[in-house]
Structures are given as structure tokens and as C-alpha cells.
Image (spheres, rainbow, N blue to C red):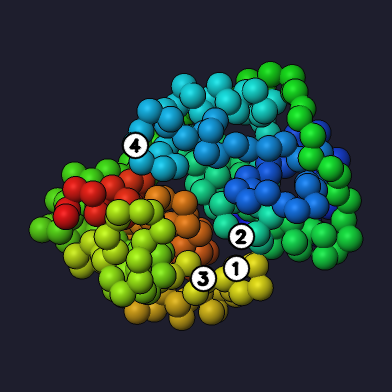
Amino acid sequence: MTDPLVSSQWLFENINNPDLIVLDASQKVDENNLQITGARYFDLKNNFSDKGSSLPNTFPNAAQFELESQKLGINHSSIIVVYDNEGVFSSPRVWWMYKTMGHQNVFVLNGGLPDWIKNNYPTEIIQPQEYKTGNFKTQLNPKNVKGYDFIKSNLNNKENIVIDARSSGRFNGTAPEPREGLRSGNIPGSYNIPYGDVLENGKFKSKEELTKVFSKLNPENKSLIYSCGSGLTACILLLAGELVLPNKTMVYDGSWTEWAQIEK
């Protein structure tokens, strides 16, 4: 499989594959406290972010990522399917993290938990679990993760296109940032595609519709750097772009939270 998305039907039909591991990357607490039967909780905020960083959702080092993945029972042979309970929100970030850490056999459940439930597939109450330690190893590709200095230098050389996934109000400086004390606005020369523009009813739009969404970019052979508030929803756009564009992709991990603090 080369497509990064799988359907609820595909997951249901393959749920008993011994190599399959389903990761729940939900950020909001589900009021019914449900998960896909057999899912394992991927704690993005606590276990898979750099807790020493002043910025939210910062990409962790390879050793931390490897250890926490092993605790979840993940092996080098694992087929990983990531979902969240909002349809598509945080799951693409986890997909991108595993790709960046060298694990290619990872997919996003298109439509997430809501679509799974809509199809009457089995769920269970979330409860703490422990797993047999996996043998997962990281092979970090540092080129996928960019920092402030790289973005700053790109203002002059314009070798890459920066695409911002925040709302148009935050991008244009007409709506406040959710983080107190942080100004709104944008990185000079960047494009705005609000992440909601690539989604419909909790799923990614068709490839034809996604092509239209990205048509204003005219990216040619340039690499695409995706940004947002903290590096999370940027990955929704990145995945959507990979469905229809051949360009190399990166994430500005500090995103607007870092940029706005430095470039005041």
C-alpha cells in the first residue's frame, strides 16, 4: 500500500493481522470514553513531545521516540494505523512523526473514530494497558523537521514555499491567537491554506478537490514547508499535499508560536 489513508472497512477487515497496531492519538477526551477495540493510546503531549521545550508539541529526540514506541509494543515489522476521535485532527501528526523516524508502514484512518462508529464496528471502554516491549528502532530523517533559522534564511533565498494551516483570521492578523500574549499575523511570503479546506465531514476531500485547493501555489519543483500554530495541524495539510503533489515536504516544528515570539 502506498496511499497514506485507510478506510474503516479496510481496518475492520485487517484488524486481526498480528502485525497490525492501532494507535489512538486523540487530543480531546471522548465523552463516551470509547476507543477502537484493541487500540493503544499514543500520548502526543506527554510521551511523544520534547518536554524540555518551551514550545508546544515539539518533536522529540530519536531515543525518546524509540523508547516510548517500544513501550507501546511497536516492532519494526508493525503496520501502524493512527486515528483520532475528531475525524482527522492529530492523527496526521503521528503519521508524519513515524515517517520522519524511518517507519514507512504507517497509515491514517480516514474519518477516525466517528467514521468507525458510524459503520458499527467494535469499540471498547478506554482502560490502561501494558504491552510486551517492542523492538522498534528509529532512523531519523532530520531533513523533514525545520527550525527558525532555516525559515529565516528562506525569506531571502525563497527556495521553499511556506504554507500555513491556521485560519485566515489568525494568518491575516484579524483574529487573536489562542495562546495568550501571542500576536497573530504570518511569516512573510507564506501562503495560507486553512487545514479545514482539505477536509469534508471529518475526512480528506477527494484528490480532485485537493488538487483545486493547492492550485494557487504553483509550487513547481520547490519543497513545501508546512506550518501552523504549533506543528500539529500543519501535518493535516502535509498529508493532503502528499496525496496530490510530488514535491518534497517538511514541517516548521516551532511554527507560528516560535516565529511570533522571536519576530515581534
Quarter of the image where one finds residue 147: top left
* Circle nearer the N terminus (1, 4): 4
Question: Tags 2 and 3 in contact by the CB under 8 Å rule?
Answer: no
Q: Residue furthest front?
A: 180
Q: Residue at x 51, y 49 (%)?
A: 93
At mark 1, the secondary structure is: strand
- Residue at numbered disc 1: 204
Closer to the camera in the image, 177 or 158: 177
Q: CA distance from mark 3 to mark 4?
A: 27 Å
- Residue at numbered disc 2: 88
| Amino acid marked by disc 3 | Gly
Q: Nearer the viewer, mark 2 or mark 1?
A: 2
- Above or below residue 58? Residue 158 is below
Q: CA distance from mark 2 to mark 1?
A: 8 Å
Quarter of the image where one finds residue 222: bottom left
- Residue at numbered disc 3: 196
Query: Quick check: can you spot residue 246?
Result: no
Q: Nearer the viewer, mark 3 or mark 1?
A: 3
Q: Nearer the viewer, mark 3 or mark 4?
A: 4
- Residue at numbered disc 4: 54
* Circle nearer the N terminus (2, 3): 2
